[in-house]
Image (cartoon, helix red, strand yellow):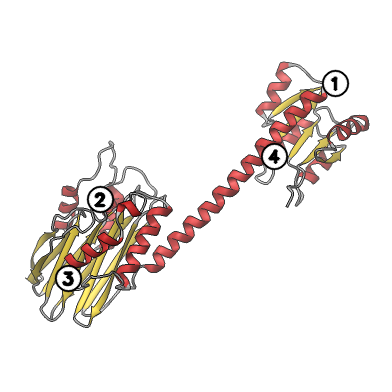
């Protein structure tokens, strides 16, 4: 399909000038003409605006400067390049036109080679800019669709014997966080959160692929009731050398309802927290991590797991580093120690604190707006009557 000719609107109250410019341009462009400022505005604001406007300054009723001012004041026509075409050649006249938003200034009598060269340059730049804007809009749409897909893949919250609450707030760029939980069998609940390095579509696709492999239990040779086995299997499935040098950190735990225990393993991931106690009024906060390397570094890596006997009241908190790696006023980052201190203060084990944690971290942030990294926070209450 051949690209259509660019269109140019020539605005001049002198018919001879319109005839001259039309003859000069008609081989390469679609040319429309207007003999007044009002007619020019009507064409420019139509459903088929021009790609460029050649605009005379000295016109009755509405001069070219006023036409330019109105076009630049409207979102629909602001980006149309305007070249003033006039017999006025004073420096202050040229300066005024450029300040109003014109891209160039051609004086009469017109030199055809110079005029054509300048028109071609600005037409090309305008079309390239439009193409870039369209490409950015399409990319933004695709990123938003990807973010929506990631959100749709996150689990529904649970109520009852086990209560789950979570927050997932994407950063300005598409990130690589994902998490989930599901019953492996009637007695074993798998809980997992992973964070792919970097941002963008590649990181997001990798995180979704990994989460889907966990949720569907499709990893080869993995025992989904044994965290070390799961980390080993997912490591071999997502080796850096096969995935554009991307790796991810991960925390995976399994709650055994029959034994009332939590088995867990972490792969270079921030430690999960568990507040636990036999009385709701007397609990302690523990860190859960096992010190393994990140997922994807080396084939056939072995991973350690640990087991924790649970008490009557238990509140597990799993999160990504985007929850606490926040820039404060003064430029310093919130540290893991500071975040741990925040968690120590949230002692009410009978409720969940995801909203309070989010509010606290927002208050520490130096600037308003989105976090620099994805904010992914999962909290699970496991209480026994």
| Quarter assignment of residue 165 | bottom left
Question: Does label 1 or label 3 sit earlier along the sequence?
Answer: 1
Question: In terms of secondary structure, where does tag 2 sit?
Answer: loop
Comparing labels 3 and 4, the label whose residue is closer to the camera: 3
Cα distance in 3D space between marks 2 and 3: 29 Å
Q: In the image as oriented, which residue stretches furthest toward the bottom?
A: 186
Give the side of residue 85 with respect to residue 375, left or right.
right
Picture residue at 26% right of the left edge, 63% below the top:
234
| Quarter assignment of residue 123 | top right
Q: Which residue is mark 3?
A: 226
Picture residue at 55% right of the left edge, 53% below the top:
138
Question: Does label 2 or label 4 sit earlier along the sequence?
Answer: 4
Task: Say which mark, if any, is on residue 109.
Answer: 1
Residue 168 percent coordinates (x, y)? 34, 60
Q: Which residue is mark 4?
A: 80
Cα distance in 3D space between marks 2 and 4: 45 Å
Question: Does label 3 or label 4 sit earlier along the sequence?
Answer: 4
Cα distance in 3D space between marks 3 and 4: 63 Å
Residue 73 percent coordinates (x, y)? 67, 40
Comparing labels 2 and 3, the label whose residue is closer to the camera: 3
Can residue 202 be seen in this snapshot?
Answer: yes
Q: Which residue is mark 2?
A: 324
Cα distance in 3D space between marks 1 and 4: 24 Å
Check the image and report above or below for 13 versus 39.
above
Which sits in the foreground, 90 or 103? 103
Comparing labels 1 and 3, the label whose residue is closer to the camera: 3
Residue 248 percent coordinates (x, y)? 28, 54
């Amino acid at each position: 399909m051949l690209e259509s000719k660019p269109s140019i609107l020539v605005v001049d109250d002198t018919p001879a000038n319109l005839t001259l410019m039309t003859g000069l341009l008609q081989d390469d462009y679609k040319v429309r003409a207007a003999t007044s400022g009002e007619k020019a505005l009507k064409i420019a604001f139509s459903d088929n605006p021009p790609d460029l406007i050649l605009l005379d300054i000295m016109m009755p009723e509405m001069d070219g400067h006023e036409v330019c001012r109105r076009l630049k004041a409207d979102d629909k026509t602001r980006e149309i390049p305007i070249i003033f075409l006039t017999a006025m050649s004073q420096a202050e006249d040229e300066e005024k036109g450029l300040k109003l938003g014109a891209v160039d200034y051609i004086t009469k009598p017109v030199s055809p080679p110079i005029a054509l060269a300048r028109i071609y340059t600005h037409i090309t730049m305008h079309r390239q800019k439009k193409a870039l804007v369209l490409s950015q809009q399409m990319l933004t749409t695709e990123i938003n669709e990807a973010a929506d897909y990631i959100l749709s893949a996150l689990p529904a919250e649970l109520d009852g014997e086990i209560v789950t609450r979570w927050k997932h707030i994407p950063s300005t760029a598409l990130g690589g966080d994902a998490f989930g939980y599901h019953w492996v069998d009637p007695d074993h609940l798998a809980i997992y959160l992973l964070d792919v390095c970097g941002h963008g579509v590649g990181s997001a696709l990798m995180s979704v692929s990994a989460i889907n492999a966990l949720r569907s239990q499709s990893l080869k040779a993995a025992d989904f009731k044994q965290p070390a086995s799961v980390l080993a299997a997912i490591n071999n499935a997502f080796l850096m050398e096969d995935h554009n040098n991307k790796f991810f950190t991960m925390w995976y735990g399994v709650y055994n309802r029959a034994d009332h225990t939590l088995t867990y393993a972490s792969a270079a991931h921030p430690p999960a927290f568990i507040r636990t106690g036999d009385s709701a009024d007397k609990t302690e906060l523990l860190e859960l991590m096992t010190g393994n390397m990140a997922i994807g570094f080396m084939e056939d890596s072995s991973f350690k797991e640990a087991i924790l006997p649970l008490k009557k009241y238990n509140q597990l908190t799993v999160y990504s580093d985007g929850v606490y790696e926040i820039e404060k006023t003064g430029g310093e980052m919130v540290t893991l120690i500071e975040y741990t201190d925040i968690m120590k203060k949230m002692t009410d084990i009978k409720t969940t604190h995801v909203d309070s944690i989010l509010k606290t971290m927002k208050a520490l942030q130096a600037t308003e707006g989105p976090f620099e990294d994805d904010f992914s926070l999962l909290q699970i209450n496991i209480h026994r009557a």
